[in-house]
Amino acid sequence: EVQLAESGGGLVQPGGSLRLSCAASGFPFSSYSMNWVRQAPEKGLEWISYISSASTTRLYADSVKGRFTVSRDNARNELYLEMNSLRDEDTAVYYCAREDAESGSTDYWGQGSLVTVSS
Amino acid sequence: DIQMTQSPSSLSASVGDKVTISCRASQTIAGHLNWYQQRPGKAPKLLIYSASTLHSGVPSRFSGSDTGTEFTLTITTLQLEDIATYYCQQSFTIPQTFGLGTRVDLK
């Protein structure tokens, strides 16, 4: 069974930093590209980052470019999102999600990790 | 960025009703259109990918179709467990973009 479990969320002050982790199991993690998608309170879904299976390609939404960094450790089956210079508008539930190579769809999602940016 | 326009933004229906949700892309996406279901307080789940292919384990009452830039999600017979918000997403280009969602509740 495919499982994705995010951790590391919490309350942080504006301008602060936080690192999210996503533990993957139930599938060959090193063979899949991964995405981060976030959802602000009572809002829709926003794609924010992509990393290819071997980390050769990393992509970001304009809203987080230069502040967030995606990485992965295929030996540990883990995905990460390093978030710096956090703003109020970064408050959201952050989901890690596996990408299906053929369709580009995000076929499995974690349960999400809440990040609250507030003073 | 490709804009995804969903309609309606919300609808009310009874158990057993047929429900139809539309999604339009601002430019061609070559059928790279996916539908997700998000129940309250839960993570999204993939329902349909590539416009019309049912994801593993998804009930057959869900179906998808397209006419190029116009896409449709249909629930043939609404069940209680289908009360949720539905999102379309294009995976043709980066950034992947989502529609604003269609909230389905009980009449």
Image: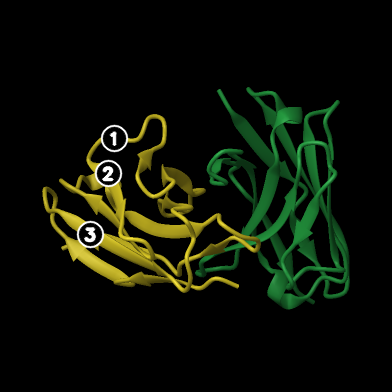
Write down the colour of chain A: green
Closer to us: A51 or A44: A51
Q: Is residue A50 above or below residue A78?
A: below
Q: CA distance from mark 3 to mark 2?
A: 10 Å
- Crowdedness near tag 3: few (<14), some (14–19) or many (≥20) residues, C-alpha within 10 Å: some
The disc placed on residue B20 is 3
B32 left or right of B1?
left
Q: Residue A109's spot in the image, x, y percent?
A: 57, 42
Q: Are marks 1 and 2 in contact (CB under 8 Å)?
A: yes
Q: Residue B34's spot in the image, x, y percent?
A: 45, 51
Chain containing mark 3: B
Closer to us: A89 or B69: B69
Task: Tell me what residue is drawn at x 85 percent, y 44 percent.
Answer: A56
- Label 1 belongs to which residue? B59
Q: Residue A107's spot in the image, x, y percent?
A: 53, 40
Q: Is residue B53 above or below residue B20?
A: above
Disc 3 and disc 2 on one polypeptide chain: yes
Chain containing mark 1: B
**The disc labelled 3 sits on which kind of residue?**
Thr
Asked where in the image residue B92 lies, by quadrant, the reply is bottom right
Sequence-earlier tag: 3 or 1:
3
Q: Is residue A58 above or below residue A98?
A: below
Disc 1 and disc 2 on one polypeptide chain: yes
Task: Tell me what residue is drawn at x 60 percent, y 73 percent.
Answer: B1
